[in-house]
Image: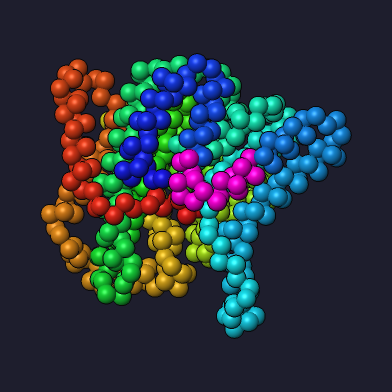
Amino acid sequence: MLFNSIEFAIFLPIVFLLYWFVFNKKVKTQNLFILAVSYLFYGWWDWRFLLLIAFTSFCSWGSGMLIYQSNNPKRKKLINAANIIINLLILGLFKYYDFFAQTFADLFLNGKSDGILLNLILPVGISFYTFQALSYSIDIYRNKIQPTRDIVQFFAFVSFFPQLVAGPIERASNLLPQFERPRTFNYRDAAEGMRLILWGLFKKIVIADNCAEYVNAVFAAPDAHKGSTLILAAIFFSFQIYGDFSGYSDIAIGTAKLFGIRLMKNFNVPYFSRDIAEFWRRWHISLTTWFRDYLYIPLGGSHCSKAKVVRNTFVIFLVSGLWHGANWTFVVWGAFHAFLFLPLILLGRNRNHRDTVAANRVLPSLKECGQMLLTFTLATIGWVIFRAESITAAWDYLASIPQDRLLSFPWLPSKTHYLVLVMCIVFMLAEEWNHRLQGTPLQLARIKSRVVRFTIYLILLALIALLNSGSGNQFIYFQF
């Protein structure tokens, strides 16, 4: 079920009303209802994979209990390792088996893959809920949290429908306790949740989906377009993937607030970053911190020699790239960002920008503008690799940019339509810049007039309705 679908527009208010007016007496009843509607939400796509998420949940819940009850360190380690291996094998089978089998066939069988491919359907969100479940048992093994004996509570934690299929990837230390205590309706949280949902739909439907139409046309035949068009398509894809993924996160966080649940922030104005290290502290925060805590730090983190820090950095970026999809383009994309990190690590500048840009000023300095522009350009080059069908296609796309009419006016199928789109992108950036410190856009409390506030909301709704492509585009990160 997509957030930008008619089904969800019907599903959400019904679930909201039942949750607060029928199933609001006890926390166990609330959790059982959340579990039921979350499985309905996920099963709407393909009910068969409900068994898979249930099995993943049971393995992590059961292993967490066994780890906690055992006094034998070796047994604890064995149980934790077994759960990790089982879950990663499931993830690998569905997501990576055909990829590596085809690679093997290309290298040793002249590309003949008949009989060795499984052609399995990739379950939506499997990478997200697998990592969320794994972090629970790992944290119990590390003595950071205690397990829950309530299996319904844990299953609801893993399958909570707002963030089930594309994150944020929550930690049990943050989300699970919220399922342990009673939840009461809070009007302020609900109102903020509705604003976040509106903002997320604006970013998805108005920004991302309209950018996607242009991007798809250009990336389908890059040879037919001049350099300026290729640049514009690359820039549009940068805003497409940001509007798409951060829009999903906004809707997820906003929807959770309607049910008295607080999810972690997953994006924090990443395109205002002054270097690539700051970009990754602000982009897909839940995944970045997951790899930091469960891979980078166990490898030694930054508390080791420079050579090992470089090694650790490359490991997490290559694994992160592979996490995004079964294609060598994602691995190269990860390696590209690892190389961008190298100068910062070697010069000890990877922690330079831990504050917010222009924190005490209305506008950034010229130096900060240059830093943000350079970071955005490097990220956009990376997004071309990410978007391309193959490494060769990515190279051809980038190599074609400076060769043909770079300074000419880019191709636009409709100047008026794309002028409106650019204005919407500028509005999005201005709104997020204005609220970069608070971290939540569309905060209109300073506007005393209720008429003005609701007029702004209505304008956004009108843009969503008028610029809706009608294609019901799936969120990009559903495939991961």
* Residue 349 visible in the current orientation: no
> Eyeballing the image, is 48 above or below 219?
above
In the rendered image, which quarter is residue 200 located in? top left
Q: Position of residue 407 (x, y in %)?
A: 21, 66
293 is higher (above) or lower (below) than 120? above
The residue at the point 65 percent across, 31 percent down is: 151
Residue 469 spot, x, y in % from top left: 24, 53
Q: Nearer the viewer, residue 246 or 59?
A: 59
Q: Which residue is nearer to you in this view: 50 or 368?
A: 50
Q: Which residue lies at the image location 55% right of the left edge and 51% below the top edge?
A: 48
Eyeballing the image, is 148 above or below 164? above
User: Bounds of the magenta span?
Assistant: 40-57
Per the image, is 370 magenta? no
Give yes or no for residue 54 being in the magenta stretch.
Answer: yes
The prevailing secondary structure element of the residues shown in magenta is helix
The image shows residue 374 at horizontal and vertical percentages of 37, 51
Question: Number of numbered discs present?
Answer: 0
The residue positioned 31% from the left and 51% from the top of the image is 472
The answer to whether residue 48 shows anywhere in this view is yes
Q: Is residue 223 left or right of residue 327?
A: left
Instruction: Please provide percent x and percent y for residue 106.
Output: 59, 78
Is residue 60 found left or right of 44 in the rendered image?
A: right
